[in-house]
Amino acid sequence: MLREVLQAVEEADGPITLNELSRRLQLDAGVIEAMLEHWARKGKVNVDRDSGAACARMPVTCSCGSNPGGADCPFVARLPRSIPVVRQADIRDNTQL
Amino acid sequence: MITTGFVSADSRVLSVALAGNPNAGKSTIFNALTGARQHVGNWPGKTVEKKTGELFLDGRRLNITDLPGTYSLSAYTLEEIVARDFLLEERPDVVVAVVDATNLERNLYLVVQLLELGLPTLLVLNMMDVAGEQGLDIDTVELSLSLGVPIVPTVASREQGIDDVIAGACRAATEPANPCLPEYLPQVEREIARLQNIINEHDAIRDVYSPRWLALRLLEGDSDVAERVGSLPGGSSLLAEAIERGAVLAAELEEDVDLTIADQRYRWIHALVGRVVRARPAHSLSRSDRIDRFVTDRRFGIPIFLLAMWIVFKFTTDLSAPWVDWLDAVLTGPVSRWAVAVLGAVGMGGTWVESLVVDGVIAGVGGVLAFIPVLAALYFALAILEDSGYMARGAFVMDRMMNRIGLHGRSFLPLMVGFGCSVPAIYATRTLTNNRDRILTGLLVPFMSCGARLPVYVLFAAIFLPRSSSLVILGLYLLGVIVAILVGLTLQRTILPATAAPGLVMELPPYRLPNWRGIRNNVWLRTRSFLQHAASLILVTSMAIWLLMAIPTGGQGSFADTPMADSAFGRLSTALTPVLRPLGFGSWQSGGALISGLVAKEVVISTMAQTYGTEATEDVGQPTTFFGDLLEIASSFIQAVIDTLKAIPGMIGINLGSAEESGEPELSAAIRSSFETTSGGHAAAAGLAFMVFVLLYTPCMATIAAERHEFGRRWAILSLVGQLIIAWVGAFIVFRLGVALGG
């Protein structure tokens, strides 16, 4: 089951929604999430926990032209949680650049 | 069979641990059990909240600990480590496993791990009411028999079943339990049995750990458990054996042992749920799913996204236009007159101070403040898209485009933030794990049109292409995206090569009606940020530009009384005109505005208001009364309301009469006249070229500083120089095309 989930994501032609994946595999979305968490532990996918608050990871204040970041950053874009598959070349790229 | 040999020495005191997935209702049950007898603190040395409480029943005291919500006991997150440490070290008399009945299959994974741990367990099936509403029919008797543990159904939010939880916990702590656990592949069971035999030979290990659980964890390669076991007598020989057997097993299975074990657990749970859930809703399409089939479709997704963006800009420009005119009239009229009157009253009339206040601060900062309605309208429209759930679909649709330039879908987040402000967007690239993706995304962010550039587009589109201003603005935003894609493709094929981005799962929220309070806060926070900017950076820059315009050069005039073209700012800006002449806007005013725009894009408008605006503020000395000014402000306000109401049906093509024409503002007329001159009669083409240049050249020095900070000097210089070249080439092409087409 675990391999089927990863395979379905890798073989999807472009991005796929969690609900669509749930329908394709006939599994609860919650179970698929759990399995993707498992793959995240194995370093095969990244579970983006903070996509809705990217600015929150940054320094103190956030305004265009001054200092960026801050949990109250007005430009935080609330985007969907995304779970991308990790490229095998990523580790190599990180050491080269 | 596992016996319950863990009851506290004092049988009147029972230690109870509440475990479960996040949001399973664990804390609600904890509150219902303990009431006011709670203690809240932190787990020793951890930032995770620890909640304990007491319950007295028939002379017994139940010490209840609410463990952090976790999905497993793998010691991967801080919460998992805290929960597992407590269960291993404190060995509670009973574990109450709280399960969300609506998400049974996922929740049972933790339950299975708890059972493997060998502690007496009571299963609480919570949210049974919601499960019923969803059409789920769970056979609790069959589930109890299959797991070999007692089960109590509850609706914790209504305190239903709480008494049964207390009674069940007391019983489970004292009665022998016989849990049914997953049976793994024969090869795995063989190794479990082998390790169990070794564990049973060492009392020091067997007394602390359930042999089966420990054998499983060691085979799964749990380093935390291995470290603990290694320090016990007989631990090192056990570890050596576990490592060897784990390697043998992995070779036999041709995959990691932990994967096989987890997979078997999932399969066992899936089969169990298939037996005990008698009726369940099919994986059918919800209303949001049905809409998504159309909205995120390969063919229709991008056209729908473009249509949504066009509506946003139509709304932004049409509805804010009357308010921009109103604010502009108030700032250049009554406010300027009041400033002159006050300065005159304190003996500063006609001095350089008056020039600084009127020509520097009011013309500069006021010129930018007039565009607040535009930004507020844009933020409002975007907040609606965000809150309704559509923006998430936009991200989904655009992800395909990101993939074409070898970027991961996650890169879309910084690029989206870039539409608000480039600086936090550069820092948002920290969410990307790959250096190459970070640098490429960071280089593309400046091409996303930040909010500060919008006033320039609104002003210039209104001057040169008034009939299609919303289309022009949408076109500029799209041009930024197209240029980013082209730059991305170029970099991908040259200095930043990448393999194709692999798959991506997105969790799209269901569509919903926007929450007006949230939208109001969102608009206010973003508009306030712009106002703070106006009160600081724009004010200082406006004053600096006024100072440079006040300094005479070439021996003509005196301080604050010199022709602007002969001022220090005029001379500096004139030096740039040869470079700008081929683009159709080779005036010193345009050059000056673009130079100051390097500080911040908002300053482009304020500089133009200052360099073109002297004549516009000459009427400030005209005598009027204070109440006359108030009346003028009120009447123009009412006119703005009427014009806005007229604009609403106009957006969908219903004309209820055009907004009252108040004549072209002086600044617009001055810009038009200047561009007519510098472009040889092709003012519209030059105006469009100017907008393209503003879109594509460096957003601000803070962006370059952020790029230098994040990616290093080399990439920051490449970004700065690259953007200037691209902006010049882009503006040149647009101007020449415009001239060729007769613009």
Image (tube, rainbow, N blue to C red):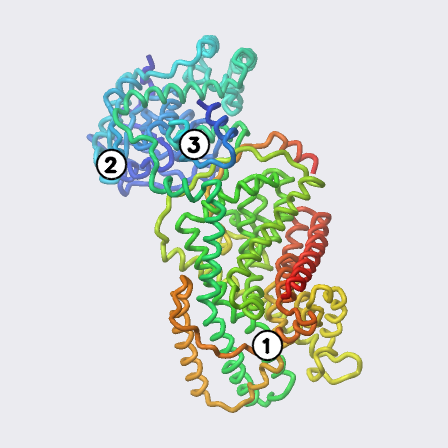
Q: Return the residue at label 1.
A: B669
Q: Return the residue at label 3.
A: A21
Q: Chain of mark 3?
A: A
CA gap between label 3 and label 2 equals: 24 Å
Q: Chain of mark 1?
A: B
The x and y percentages for residue A31 are 40, 29
Bin the neighbour count of mark 1 within 10 Å (Cα to Cα): few under 14, some 14-19, many 20 and up: some
Label 2's element?
A: helix
The x and y percentages for residue B404 are 59, 40
The x and y percentages for residue B562 are 71, 83
Q: Is residue A47 above or below residue B461?
A: above
Q: Callout 1, which amino acid? A: Ala
Q: Nearer the viewer, mark 1 or mark 2?
A: 1
Bin the neighbour count of mark 3 within 10 Å (Cα to Cα): few under 14, some 14-19, many 20 and up: many
Q: Callout 3, which amino acid? A: Leu
Label 1's element?
A: helix
Q: Callout 2, which amino acid? A: Glu
Numbered circle sitting on residue B169 = none
Q: Return the residue at label 2.
A: B133
Could you tell me which quadrant the N terminus of chain B lies in? top left
